[in-house]
Amino acid sequence: MGTVRLLVALPMVSANPKDTCVNTWHFNTTGIPDVTTHLIPILTAVKDVYTGVKGYLSNQISWSLATFKFYDLADAEPRAPIHLGVFNPTGTAGTSEAPHELALAASFEGLPVSGQKQSRRRGRIYFGPLSTNVYLGSVFTSTMLTAASTAMAGLRTASDASAAWTWIVYSRTAPDAQREVPVARGWVDNAIDIQRRRGVAATTRTVW
């Protein structure tokens, strides 16, 4: 079996590399990762996730410059990408801008197993930066929650239907036999998450 890591990088219109938002996904393939058999179908399924939430993401994302990189975790570090390119999912982009630190946490996990820590069998993706149409007051709207949960469930459905690849939770700290767990279910809630590292880098300073 081959395990691959997919990095999706969403740069901002500021063109400051420090403002780029990156999400990490993991997948198990049925053999040595092959672009046609494994990577392209995985990329298509992940693009569908972003298509489902694209209209709720910030207008500060420079979609035409977004990229993806696949890595084979069997390769020695530092790893070179085995497949990379432009990442621009279909759909209409958001038209407004919320603070870049705001994010929606989409959690997922494998089924519980006796004797194994469930915390190592869980993962999450932070969608953002967001537009202002995703929250009302201090919580996410039901429309945003439905869009995100539907998008994530679609990836699990695609994974379940594939004989060539599986969406997994990958834990570096788990024992080797427990390091990869197929994603079985997930959830989103209406609490707004704060990702401070996604804050826009300062360009000026006013002293007093």
Image (spheres, helix red, strand yellow):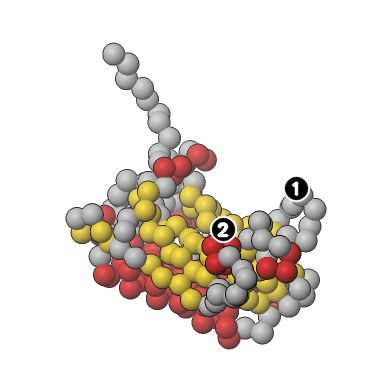
Residue 148 placement: quadrant: bottom left
Residue 183 locus on image (x, y percent):
56, 74
Work out whether residue 140 or residue 57 is closer to the camera in this orientation and state it. Answer: 140
- Residue 170 visible at all: yes
Q: Earlier in the sequence, mark 2 or mark 1?
A: 2
Q: CA distance from mark 2 to mark 1?
A: 17 Å
Specify the amino acid type for callout 2.
Answer: Thr
160 left or right, relative to 83: left
Residue 132 locus on image (x, y percent):
26, 55
146 left or right, relative to 31: left
Residue 145 placement: quadrant: bottom left
In the image, residue 147 sits, relative to residue 14, either above or below, namely below
Q: Which mark, residue 24?
A: 2
Residue behind mark 1:
78
- Residue 27 visible at all: no
Element type at mark 1: loop
